[in-house]
Image (cartoon, rainbow, N blue to C red):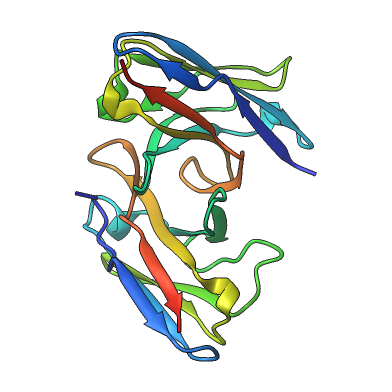
């Protein structure tokens, strides 16, 4: 069965960095676009970034451009999100999600990893 | 302020039918497919509807989706207490070059 397991979240000071990982199993990872989506405490969903199956096509939401970098390693069935210059408003649960038929619908989600940016 | 507009809350009695609206513009809903997600308390979102009206395998036909112009609607019939959740619409926004979600609608089954 499809499984997505995020890791790497935690408490970090403003201006700090964190690298999230998402381990995928149960499907051919290299065939699918993947995304990161976040949810601030008590708030709605916010899409962060997506990466094409080969890694050649990448998009970011404006608020993270220049600070976050999405990447993937198809040999390791893994998705990553490098987050630099973190701000308090980046505090959220970060989900990795598999894109279904299009880059903007998500058929499987991980359980999420909490990132807290606070001094 | 979300790009897609949903009512903050809806409610209905068990067994009844409820609809949740999602309003956008020509740059998003008007020219792209819409998805709907259900988020039960404390869990990750789950895909309910994709490509406006398609259900993934395992999603009961009590859930349906439709789109007209720049608006989309999620319908749920035969409401159950287990349907109490937050529901989100989502699509691509061609002007923003990104995925956009509605602010979410909390469904209460009275």
Q: Is residue A41 left or right of residue B37?
A: left
Pinpoint residue A51: horizontal percent, then vertical percent. Answer: 50, 26
Quadrant of res A21: top right
Q: Which quadrant would the C terminus of chain B be assigned to in this image?
A: bottom left
Residue A66 vertical position relative to residue B78 in the rendered view, above or below: above
Looking at the image, the residue that sits furthest to the front is A119
Residue plotted at (73% across, 16% down) = A76
Pinpoint residue A86: horizontal percent, then vertical percent. Answer: 32, 16
Residue plotted at (55% across, 91% down) = B15
Task: Please name whichever residue, A108 or B104, is drawn nearer the observer in this view of the structure.
Answer: B104
Pinpoint residue A12: horizontal percent, then vertical percent. Answer: 40, 14
Task: Please name whichever residue, A4 or B99, is drawn nearer the observer in this view of the structure.
Answer: A4
Residue A39 vertical position relative to residue A5 in the rendered view, above or below: below
Residue plotted at (45% across, 26% down) = A115
Quadrant of res A32: top right
Across the whole image, how many numbered discs are drawn on residues? 0
Residue plotted at (61% across, 28% down) = A6
Q: Is residue A32 left or right of residue B51?
A: right
Q: Is residue B65 left or right of residue B25?
A: right
Pinpoint residue B7: horizontal percent, then vertical percent. Answer: 27, 68
């Amino acid at each position: 069965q499809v499984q997505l397991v995020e890791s790497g979240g935690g408490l970090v000071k403003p201006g700090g960095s964190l690298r999230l990982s998402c381990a995928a199993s149960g499907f051919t990872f290299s065939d699918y676009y993947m995304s990161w989506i976040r949810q601030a405490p008590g708030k709605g969903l916010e899409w962060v970034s997506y990466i094409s199956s080969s890694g050649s096509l990448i998009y970011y939401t404006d608020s993270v451009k220049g600070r976050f970098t999405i990447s993937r390693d198809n040999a390791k069935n893994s998705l990553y999100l490098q987050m630099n210059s973190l701000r308090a408003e980046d505090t959220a649960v970060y989900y990795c999600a598999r894109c279904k038929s299009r880059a903007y619908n998500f058929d499987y989600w991980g359980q999420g990893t909490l990132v807290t940016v606070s001094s | 302020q979300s790009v897609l507009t949903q009512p903050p809350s809806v409610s209905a009695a068990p067994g009844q039918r409820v609809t949740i609206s999602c309003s956008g513009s020509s740059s998003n809903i008007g020219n792209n497919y819409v998805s709907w997600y259900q988020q039960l308390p404390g869990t990750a979102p789950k895909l309910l509807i994709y490509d406006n009206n398609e259900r993934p395998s395992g999603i009961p036909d009590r859930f349906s989706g439709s789109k007209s112009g720049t608006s989309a609607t999620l319908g749920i019939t035969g409401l159950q207490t287990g349907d109490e959740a937050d529901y989100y619409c989502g699509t691509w926004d061609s002007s923003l070059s990104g995925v956009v979600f509605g602010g979410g609608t909390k469904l209460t089954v009275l």
